[in-house]
Amino acid sequence: AEVILGEDGKPLSKSALKKLAKGKGKDKKPKDKNFGKVDPEKAAKKAAEKAAKAKAKADALAAEEALVVDTPHGDKKIMTDTMASAYKPEMVEKAWQEWWEKSGFYSADAEAGKAAGEEGRFVIVIPPPNVTGSLHLGHALTAAIEDTLTRWHRMKGDVTLYVPGTDHAGIATQSIVEKMLVRDQGINRHDLGREKFLEKVWEWKDQYGSRICRQIRELGSSVDWSREAFTMDDKCSKAVVEAFCRFHEDGILFRDKRLINWSCKLKSAISDIEVDHEDIEGGVMRSVPGHTKQDKYQFGMFTEFAYKVSGSDEEIIVATTRLETMLGDTAVAVHPEDPRYKHLHGKFVDHPFHDRKIPIILDDVLVDMNLGTGAVKITPAHDPNDYECGIRHKLPFITIFTPDGIVNSEGAQFEGMMRYDARVAVEEALKEVGLLKDKYPKPMKLGFCSRSGDVIEPMIMPQWFVDCDNMAKRAMDAVKDGELRILPEMHVSTWNHWLSNSRPWCVSRQLWWGHRIPAYFACTKAEEGVIDQNANDHKNRWIVARSEPVARTKAAALLGVPESEVVLNQDEDVLDTWFSSGLFPFSVMGWPDQTADLSGFFPTSLLETGLDILFFWVARMVMMSLQLTDKLPFKDVYLHAMVRDKEGRKMSKSLGNVIDPLEVIHGCTLDTLYAKLQSGNLASKEVAKAEAAFKADFEADGGIPACGADALRIGLLAYTVQGRDINLDIKRVVGYRSFCNKLWQGTRFLLGCFGEFMPTDVMRSTILDVASTRDRFILSKLNTCIRETTQCLTEYEFGKSVQVLQSFFVGTLCDVYLELIKPVVHNKDDAVGANQAKATLWLCLDSFLKLLHPICPFVTEELWQRLPGRGSLAGEAESIMIAGWPVADPSWDNTAAEDSTALVLDCIGAARSLRHENKLKDKVPADFFIACSSQDSTDSITAQIADFTTLSTAKTVTMLVAPAEPPMKCSLKIVTDSVKVYVNCAGMVDKSSEIAKCNKEIKMLTPLIKKLEAKMANPKYLETAPPATVDKDRSKLREYAGKKEEAEKTLKSLQ
């Protein structure tokens, strides 16, 4: 093979040979001697251009900044005469909230509320968010809905009150402060003691608990801050004590040992809503709080083991996913009809680790003989189904764990082990004695404590319970009888399901932060330290009282000793957070005291919240209010859909898809979104997935652009349809910033039309005196917008209301009316017409901004204040938020004007299409002919011939009356059966292209006409086809035939 050498005499490498081969046959370009040299003249020119651009940008920015005038806190916003060229939410939303609050627009008078009665007032309490956290987009939707309704009712003239507040969030707050103590001081709450610990919690609440209030303000919520409530404040605390005592006096509150959800990590009972149920795959490994022997433990495994039948070698095999609970088994259940176990009825099995015999019981409720072995182990103290079985068969209830999840003395040789370490040890022990039979994966649903991540352990504990049966029935009857409405109505079935299956409500929690239970265990000094306060025999020793002195008096009477001999120990537990939240609609009004607020504002009007807490909060409010006040707490319950991410997943910190409303309002960089993910506890796989989603959505903008509260509110409300879930694409919400920009720029342009115009007090009443058809058209359309918006808000159709308002402003006011009046408002030769158009425009803008205000409060206030003559009219409101809600004026209804304008707009559309099809330049006037075969059409178009002329860029417009025909070289567009529009193309179009167009249309129409003619000639079709279908085909045939005829005429004129 030929060896090719390089310049150094050495053989070329393979890569060098490839480069040489690629370069063969190519002439080398001569080297540019000036390559790399800088042309000073060009460089100077380029630098100057760059500097000019930078200066222009800086000047524009300075000009925009000059439009922002600092307003003293609480004063009415100072606005410059010049408007910014584009919508800037941070500029628009500045200062208004402070002025609204300081002006007292949010406050309400209790006496006025009382005088107005339930029909003349609107009262709503905020679903109190947890003081520990910050609002997410679900809260933002709640705020948007509630404030939209509040502002609407306020503008309607109702006495309006929107009460803010926060929830003390017992478990969540205590957990946060405990973690803080461990992190900062290396101590726990027990090191401090109860009183000192509670002082730390209050310090934390005062320091960090205001974030939610700031968010509520920035969302624009018009709440009465003078009535702000906290579920642990003195007023709410008094209500909690009173409610507990009254429940006890009514005989529906009692103390008992029952099965509850227990968090071993928190050492507390928790409510059902604080349990996260997760579907897990069989054999999954999970870490468990408090367990250190292994990093992770296996879940979702079905373990089969055998019990030996007493006195024989026979075995009965059972299976469980919680093997450690076999230490507390007190029975094995079989179906009474199962032939496999008939001979074992009444027999016993031996427990392998205890010296006790376990009965074989018959239970056709729990046992399905077709599942597994047909035998079921029963652990009444640690399983809800087994608990019910234990009650039916009066079985022993053996608790095998301590409150912190350690196996107790009932656990034989496994005593002292953590519960999942015991699971492993029990399996080994069963294997050693030959009773372990099988083990295999089984997908299952596992309950986790939402606060601690701990696996929930069903436990029997002494707790306080409320019997809800009678209250639940009253709550169901209220809905059934129509006294209480639940909307959307599809949720009524859920309401009835929950309440018809109500169980005693466990209201006690083993925490320090919360409302301490007003119950005292009483004993004499001689009994102190000896008597067991949890023994069933001593239940009557628990004294429920409004204060300790009252409890002491009751105890002395009960024990028959002097008060000085009584020893009282208040229950260490606190009440479930939902207990105080359930009182919220009336506790914030001062109940049980007969306050002015209670008589003026209770019952409230509406409860608006997410459907996920229909039972946990809404039902409890209704039940507690009926029991304690004998009144419903509100008339309507509106449940908005659950907010999920665009993939339908629940908004969750564990998925990294939670967006803070302030991140949308003020904007957020991509790096900040990434950092938030990295600082959490997400798995790397979930972090990568969430980062990819953020990048796909926001990389182009460098993050979430600042949208403002108005865009966020209207974007969220646009999503609300009466369904179950909202799959929220945050990009779509961000997109409503564009609507706010259209509103800003459109109004800015409209304001420019007014010139020196000033509104008058009689303008509204005289607006029709010299109104043109176009004016009557827009006023009639405004009436429709007013009625539809009002109806939407009345029926909680927020998404539809957004569509109605957008359609009117963009599609009707700007795209139609504005275009029609552009030449009119600047016409110096027709001052009357110009003033009429300006007056009509002013009324439309004023009303539209009022209609939009409840949804977008900031931008509407800013624009409304800029309307000419603001503050000059008699009786005018100081702010749009207290201006009167628009009411449709029947005299403005004008379907004839709407139909007429619609026809003219269709003609204008036809004229524009003709221009486009014939390639006529937009700015070159053309001669148009309009042929009408009906007098109504002729009259309508003649009345608005000026509008047609303007928007069609017509040189002349000739109305043709039959038998008059247009010139030969005209192009046609059929508008309706009775209206045709022609444009004279003589000398303006390419003759050959126009002939080709006519031939094409004739070719397309001919087979369609033949097909329809064949149908019409077919007697069978005419006999069997529905009359409406036959009429439709006849109409099509006439239309196609007319178009073909006109095309043939045009073709003839061109040839």
Image: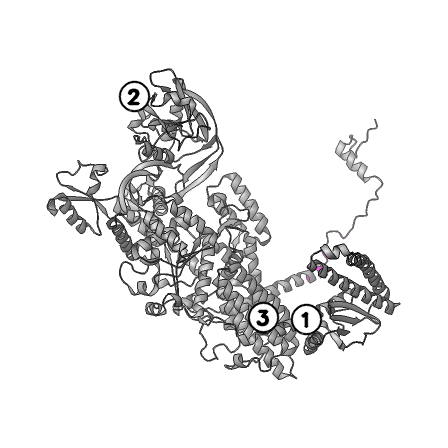
Q: Are marks 2 and 1 in contact (CB under 8 Å)?
A: no
Residue displayed at 62% across by 80% down: 834
- Front one among 1033 and 852: 1033
Q: Position of residue 822 (x, y in %)?
A: 64, 75
Dot 2 amino acid type:
Asp
- The amino acid marked with disc number 1 is Leu
- Comparing 458 with 881, the one in front is 458
- Of labels 2 and 1, the one closer to you: 1
- The residues tagged by marks 2 and 1 sit, at their Cα atoms, a distance apart of 96 Å
Of the two numbered discs 2 and 3 on the same chain, state the one appearing first in sequence. Answer: 2
Whole-number angstrom distance, CA of label 1 to CA of label 3: 15 Å
Is residue 224 something that shows in the picture? yes
The residue singled out by tag 3 in the image is 781
Give the image quarter of residue 314. top left
Q: In this view, does 874 lie above or below 973?
A: below
Residue that appears at 30% across and 65% down: 596
Picture quarter with the C terminus: bottom right
Marks 2 and 3: CB-CB under 8 Å? no
Mark 1 lies on residue? 903
Q: Residue 355 carries which label?
A: 2
Return the residue found at the far left: 562
Q: Magenta segment, which residues?
A: 32-44
Check the picture and name the quadrant holding the N terminus: top right
Type of secondary structure dominating the magenta stretch: loop
Q: Nearer the viewer, residue 1037 or 100?
A: 1037
- Please tell me in which quadrant of the rendered image residue 541 appears: top left
Q: Residue at x 37, y 46 (%)?
A: 172
Tell me the crowding category of disc 3: few under 14, some 14 to 19, or many 20 or more residues within 10 angstroms, Cα based: many
Within-10-Å neighbours for mark 1: few <14, some 14–19, many 20+: some
Q: Where is residue 421 in the image (x, y as percent from the top left)?
A: 38, 28
Q: Where is residue 762 in the image (x, y as percent from the top left)?
A: 51, 82
